[in-house]
Image (spheres, helix red, strand yellow):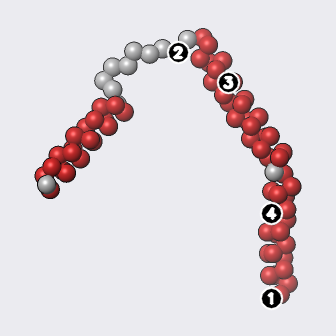
Amino acid sequence: MKYFKAFLAVIGTVLVFNFIFPKRIFAYLDAGSGSYIIQIIIAIVAGGAFGIKIYWRKIYHFFKNLTSRVDRSDKEN
């Protein structure tokens, strides 16, 4: 049983490396790929900005309370 688990581990490792690092890759980037990548980047930035807009008050109050805690601890000492 001990050898069987080791055998499965070796076979699994070989298969994973075979799928991650293939020997030949037949792929290309056409003209539309660059446009798609730019759209993804714009969507990530817009989504992040929208998320910050929605939670801005919570973010603002979190940092405001964080700095006020530091100020209170300085005044107590």
Determine whether the residue tagged by mark 4 lies in a helix, strand or loop: helix
Q: Position of residue 22 (x, y in %)?
A: 33, 26
What distance separates the C-alpha of mark 2 from that of mark 1?
Answer: 62 Å
- Which residue has dot 1 on it? 77
Q: CA–CA distance between discs 2 and 3?
A: 14 Å
Q: Position of residue 61 (x, y in %)?
A: 85, 62
Kind of residue sitting beneath label 1: Asn
Question: Is 51 positioned to the left or the right of 31 in the image?
Answer: right
Query: Can you tell which of label 3 and label 1 is closer to the viewer?
Result: 3
Mark 4 or 1: in front is 4
Q: Please, what secondary structure does the residue beneath circle 3 have?
A: helix
Point out which mark residue 29 bears.
2
Residue 47 vs 63, above or below: the answer is above
| 73 in relation to 16, above or below | below
Q: Are marks 2 and 1 in contact (CB under 8 Å)?
A: no
Q: Residue at x 17, y 46 (%)?
A: 7
What amino acid is labelled 3 in the image?
Answer: Ile
- Sequence-wise, the earlier of marks 4 and 1 is 4
The reply to whether callout 4 and callout 1 are in contact (CB within 8 Å) is no
Q: Position of residue 40 (x, y in %)?
A: 66, 28
Residue 62 image label: 4
Q: Quadrant of residue 46?
A: top right
Is the residue marked by circle 4 packed among few (<14), some (14-19), or many (20+) residues within 10 Å? few
Whichever of labels 4 and 2 marks the residue nearer the N terminus, that label is 2
Amino acid type shown at disc 2: Leu
77 up-or-down from 26: above or below: below
Judging by the rendered image, the residue that carries numbered circle 3 is 38
Q: Quadrant of residue 38?
A: top right
